Amino acid sequence: MNILTPPDTASCTSRACGHIWLRARVLEDTHIHLWFVFSYTHNKEVKCYPPTPTQLYNPQFVNTIADKSSLQFVGSTGEFVERREMTKRFQLPPGTYVVIPSTHSPRREAEFILRMFTEQPVAAGYLDVSTNIPLKPARMTSKDLLSETYDRYAGNDRKMDAHELRGFLTETATIELQATLQFPLESCRTLLALMDEDKSGFLSFEEARSAWKEIKAYMAIFQQFDKNNTNSVDTYELRDMFSRLGFSISTPVLASIVRRYGGRDRTITLEDFIMAICKLTSLFGSFRAEQRSRGVSGEAVEFSMNKFLEVTMLL
């Protein structure tokens, strides 16, 4: 980019005089045809010339000048020539110009040196923008937030008991969902037992993360039916809610859930709904596991007394 000041001498009348020198940096025995063109920018937004150094390296100013719609052809070196260097004398009225070096072959690149010689000082610079990549502050992923919260509540063994699980679920729901989730301690004992896959009596991080993922899915379904945001839904909607989660519940089983959690007003809270789902999932899983171990199918399986007590004491 070259900004020409007013005319130099009387010999150039109303035009500014100078020379443009282009030289290719050929590092190997290759044949490169050189050429350059210079254009005048008539964009009315470019009102100030010569520009200040700040303007020369301002991306918005540079992009305005480089706008193709604002460029007007004023001259070139003529035909492409197979030379290492070339010089062109010019006489141009004062204004803002863009010099564009080029090779003859499409997509052929070459390093070059471009110099401009004028009788009067001019302001010139590269038609480029400075590299500026705004760095956004790193955001913690959902997994990172969950891990950080887990570490605050887990013990030195990086495992979690029922008391710790209660605080973990409450804080995680607040941070991630901006929701209130208050489980009684006894419910947390049940949740821990149901989510404890290795039967250690504690939850590892992976078990806690899996449990939270399921609880979020249950909360999403509950909120679809809790249209008044009262943290409760009518028990007559339970069948549809279970159906959304893939459960097909018979009337006797549904009646048992209503008697267990419904109360006088026949509504169920979010925490109780989650407990009911977790119990259903656990009991159904135990039933299917016993069927597989005995090699039977259908809707019946035989439990020993010890096995029955082992399963039900977790609830």
Image (cartoon, rainbow, N blue to C red):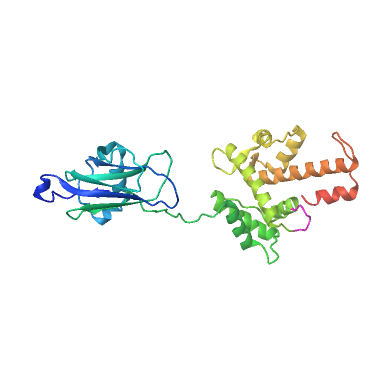
Q: Main secondary structure of the magenta part?
A: loop
Whole-percent x, y for residue 189 in the image: 72, 55
| Residue 161 in which image quadrant | bottom right
Whole-percent x, y for residue 289 in the image: 83, 43
Residue placed at 43% from the left, 42% from the top? 108
- Viewer-side residue, 46 vs 180: 46
The answer, for residue 199, to whether it is visible in the render is yes
Whole-percent x, y for residue 62 in the image: 30, 47
| Residue 238 in which image quadrant | top right
Q: Is residue 115 left or right of residue 13?
A: right
Residue placed at 89% from the left, 37% from the top? 296
Q: Residue furthest left?
A: 10
- Viewer-side residue, 2 vs 105: 105
Bounds of the magenta span? 196-201
- Viewer-side residue, 119 vs 260: 119
The answer, for residue 171, to whether it is visible in the render is no
Indicate yes or no whether the magenta region holds residue 122. no
Whole-percent x, y for residue 34 in the image: 35, 43
36 above or below 250?
below
Q: Residue furthest bottom?
A: 156
Q: Is residue 59 left or right of residue 230?
A: left
Q: Is residue 163 left or right of residue 18?
A: right
Residue placed at 35% from the left, 45% from the top? 83
Total of numbered circles in the picture? 0
Indicate yes or no whether the magenta region holds residue 198. yes
